[in-house]
């Protein structure tokens, strides 16, 4: 499993241990209790880094490497944005360079409350997948104490609220559109891992380029461009 190693901030030292010894949830709970700012990292056995951003006792963001989950598509699936408004938002997004949430409000007419709920659902869905990765393919978890980039700060979720949302998703109490979203994300992430050229270094350049193109097309289809 590899030898544990440590990192430190001004107050705390955190040790990366195999997940059998320290779970992702336990480390996240400790980081939130200590009100540390940074990234709770989950590494899988392939070396990919996933994580949960924390700040001042709250979960403020999460990401899963190789996963694509556009906010505008989520707003459509939850009924907060119709397809016509979705197309207008996509066009505005490409022209303005603004973040999807801002465009959803200014162009699509999505209320701040609906947007906030969608962002919380997005983070909870990502955390569900992080738990699945930890259980099936996880190697270790550690905290990197550092400033949270503005681009990674999307919600302000207490740990209890995140756990309740995760429990609803994991127990099948989510709506059919939410479950479809989770299934689609998992499928695309699996495809991304299988097709990514960096995971196929033994192949010749022509084959790797073809795999890269297939991944680009699959990503475009998921985003509604193909």
Image (tube, rainbow, N blue to C red):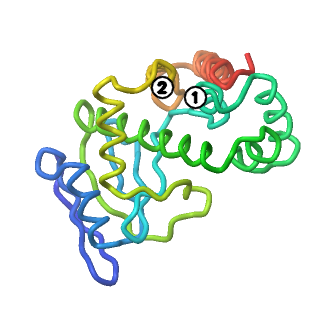
Kindly give the residue lying farthest to the right in the view shown.
95
The image shows residue 223, relative to residue 18, as above or below, that is above
Front residue of 100/65: it is 100
Quote the CA–CA distance across marks 2 and 1: 7 Å
Q: How many marks?
A: 2
**Dot 1 crowding, Cα within 10 Å, few <14, some 14–19, many 20+:** some
Judge from the rendering whether residue 190 lies leftward or rightward of residue 19; answer left or right: right
Please state the horizontal and vertical placement of residue 96, each as a whole percent of the image.
86, 48
Which numbered disc, 2 or 1, marks the residue that appears first in the sequence? 1
Determine which residue is flagged by label 1: 78
Q: Quadrant of residue 169?
A: top left
Quadrant where the image shows the C terminus: top right
The image's mark for residue 145 is: none
Q: Nearer the viewer, residue 110 or 15?
A: 110
In percent of the image, x 35 and y 25: which residue is there?
173
Q: Is residue 185 shown left or right of residue 113?
A: left
- Picture residue at 36% right of the left edge, 48% below the top: 162
Rendering quarter of residue 118 = top right
* 127 relative position to 79: left or right: left
Disc number for residue 178: 2
- Horizontal side, residue 210 vs residue 58: left or right: right
| Frontmost residue, 172 versus 146 | 172
What residue appears at the point 75 percent right and 21 percent down from the top-left corner?
225
Dot 1: what SS? loop
Mark 2: secondary structure: helix
Report x, y in % for residue 157. 42, 56
- Give the percent coordinates (x, y) of residue 224: 70, 21
Residue depicted at x 26% and y 38%: 134
Q: Are marks 2 and 1 in contact (CB under 8 Å)?
A: yes
């Amino acid at each position: 499993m590899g030898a544990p190693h440590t990192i430190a901030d001004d107050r705390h030292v955190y040790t990366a241990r195999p997940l059998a010894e320290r779970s992702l949830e336990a480390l996240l709970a400790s980081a939130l209790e200590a009100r540390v700012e940074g990234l709770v990292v989950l590494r899988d056995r392939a070396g990919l880094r996933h994580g949960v951003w924390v700040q001042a006792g709250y979960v403020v963001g999460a990401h899963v490497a190789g996963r694509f989950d556009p906010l505008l598509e989520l707003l459509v699936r939850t009924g907060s944005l119709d397809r016509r408004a979705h197309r207008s938002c996509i066009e505005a997004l490409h022209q303005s360079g603004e973040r999807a949430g801002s465009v959803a409000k200014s162009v699509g007419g999505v209320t701040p409350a609906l947007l906030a709920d969608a962002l919380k659902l997005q983070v909870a869905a990502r955390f569900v997948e992080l738990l699945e990765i930890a259980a099936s393919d996880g190697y270790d978890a550690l905290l990197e104490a550092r400033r949270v980039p503005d681009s990674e700060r999307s919600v302000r979720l207490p740990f209890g609220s995140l756990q309740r949302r995760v429990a609803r998703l994991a127990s099948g109490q989510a709506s059919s559109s939410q479950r479809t979203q989770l299934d689609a994300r998992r499928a695309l992430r699996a495809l991304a891992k299988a097709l990514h050229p960096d995971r196929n270094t033994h192949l010749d350049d022509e084959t790797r380029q073809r795999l890269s193109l297939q991944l680009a097309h699959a990503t475009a289809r998921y985003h509604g461009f193909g």
